[in-house]
Image (tube, helix red, strand yellow):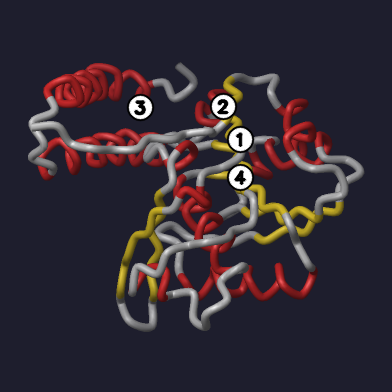
Amino acid sequence: MITDFEYYNPVRIFFGKDQFSKIAGQIPSGSKIMLLYGGGSIFRNGVHEKITEALKGFNITEFGGIEPNPSYETCMKAVAEIKSKKIDFLLAAGGGSVIDATKFIAAAAKYPFGDPWDILAKSVPVHDSLPIGVILTLPATGTEMNRNAVISRKSTNEKLAFSSPWSLPRFSVLLPEAAGSLPKNQVANGIVDAFVHVIEQYLTYPVNAHIQDRFAEAILLSLIEEGPKAYANPAD
């Protein structure tokens, strides 16, 4: 049986330690940028300093405190600030939670139909979104180069996902040195998160796709082999 599909992934990837100089060239000049991050690790590992140095001359607003399993409530605070300050470009610096939150915030800031939660709860299609760039410090989920995001709503105890081509980042900077500076519990979280995300699709999509299944098995075996090494020495 032939299954129809459409695939499109325009995310530009910059990998390595000397990639900060590329960021400014990926953002339209004159943009009002919101830099979004989590608990503040980007200050401890020097990433914040390098970002602000690379974006000298840009108008930058910062929004921190995005939690693991990012909440709708936190996201909507960012949306309110975006609208009041007329932000027109979002830059997520951190791991999967920060990036997922930024994807939803980008869509919610342009949502014209009332409560943006409907994007998740009612699967209302996204037809517009603010552009996103990513500075990845914690590898795990692949959200830095895909169209998916998961958001929680504390008031209703819901955790829902959405997917939209509008949510694909314009670019992602992958920082192995920043990942190497993480505490061991975060490294372990990333290894397990990657394993679980592969298992989810490997076990639950009965599409008889042998090549993709072999890819998945290779990833799982590699995580089993290399995960303990990364945990023992995160800088490796």
Query: Three-letter amino acid code at disc 2?
Result: Ile
| Residue for badge 3 | 231
Please, is residue 67 above or below residue 146 in the view?
below
Locate the C terminus and report the quarter of the image it occupies: top left
Mark 3, other Cα within 10 Å: few <14 / some 14–19 / many ≥20: many
Mark carried by residue 171: 1
Mark 2 or mark 3: whose residue is earlier in sequence = 2
Query: Tag 4's secondary structure?
Result: strand
Instruction: Say whether residue 227 is left or right of residue 105.
Output: left
- How far is mark 1 from mark 4, CA to CA? 12 Å
- Residues 73 and 206: in front is 206
Pointers 2 and 1 in contact (C-beta within 8 Å): yes
Q: Residue at x 19, y 40 (%)?
A: 201
Please, is residue 200 above or below residue 80 in the view?
above
Q: Residue at x 76, y 53 (%)?
A: 33
Mark 4 or mark 2: whose residue is earlier in sequence = 2
Query: Tag 2's secondary structure?
Result: strand
- How far is mark 4 from mark 2, CA to CA? 15 Å
Mark carried by residue 13: 2
Mark 1 or mark 3: whose residue is earlier in sequence = 1
